[in-house]
Image (tube, grey):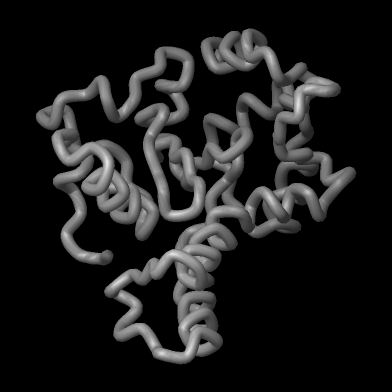
Amino acid sequence: MAELLDWLRELPDCVLGPGLSAAELDRAEGAVGVTIPPLWRAVLARACPVARAGSGAHYPDWRLIDEPAVRALVDAPVRGLLFDVEHNDFWWHAWGAAPEPMAERLSLARRRLAEVPRLTPLRHHWYVGPEDDSPVFSIVQADLYVPALSLADLPTGRSQRAVPTRQWPIGSVPFWSELHAYAQLGHHPELGFAQLGRGGL
């Protein structure tokens, strides 16, 4: 945890505010429907990162002073995929055949995506699943990569590009991990992560 706090202190676009109480964290989780992984909860209990004024950065306000902004960050991964369904011909085969009318296609995609785990936003478009061993995902619509193999690896920069295949498996988040694997097939097929996808796009 100390390494993560040091990493946050060195980020140029945030400052560290007071830590949150367990009651504040529980309230935030319930309000926006996420499960913050235990390690990140411990970090937030010590210090809460907030965007530096004028930086244009986006950090979740876990005190929910601006709850709609936190909801927008939590909803952004699904919202981005729905955008790709509508505008970029994205479809996940596990959802079944894509309906032809776009309104029905979006409705089915929205129902399917309501079933996938809700991710906890860390900063900008970086997200993590509910467990400490979850990869850290960078998610922009259907384009995913892993800037860190887990929360504990954030300070070291131990990312998908630095880890040989033989060191897997790492933590996996249903749907998001496989979507990430398929994203890598398109961009970096030589990486081991690209070989983890078994069916979807």
Quarter residue 97 falls in: bottom left
Name the residue: 58% across, 50% down: 35
Left or right of 91, for residue 77: right
Name the residue: 26% across, 52% down: 182
Residue 92 location (% of width, % of height): 33, 70
Left or right of 135, for residue 198: left
Name the residue: 47% across, 76% down: 109
Residue 83 vertical placement versus 192 (above, below): below
Residue 157 vertical placement versus 98 (above, below): above
Residue 48 vertical placement versus 139 (above, below): above
**Residue closest to the eye, 21 or 84:** 84
Quarter residue 157 falls in: top left
Residue 85 location (% of width, % of height): 46, 70
**Residue closest to the eye, 196 or 134:** 196
Name the residue: 39% across, 69% down: 89
Q: Quadrant of the N terminus?
A: top right
Residue 103 location (% of width, % of height): 55, 87
Q: Quadrant of the C terminus?
A: bottom left
Which residue, as the protein is rendered here, is positioned at the far front?
Answer: 87
Residue 65 location (% of width, % of height): 89, 44
**Residue closest to the eye, 33 or 14:** 14
Left or right of 111, for residue 57: right
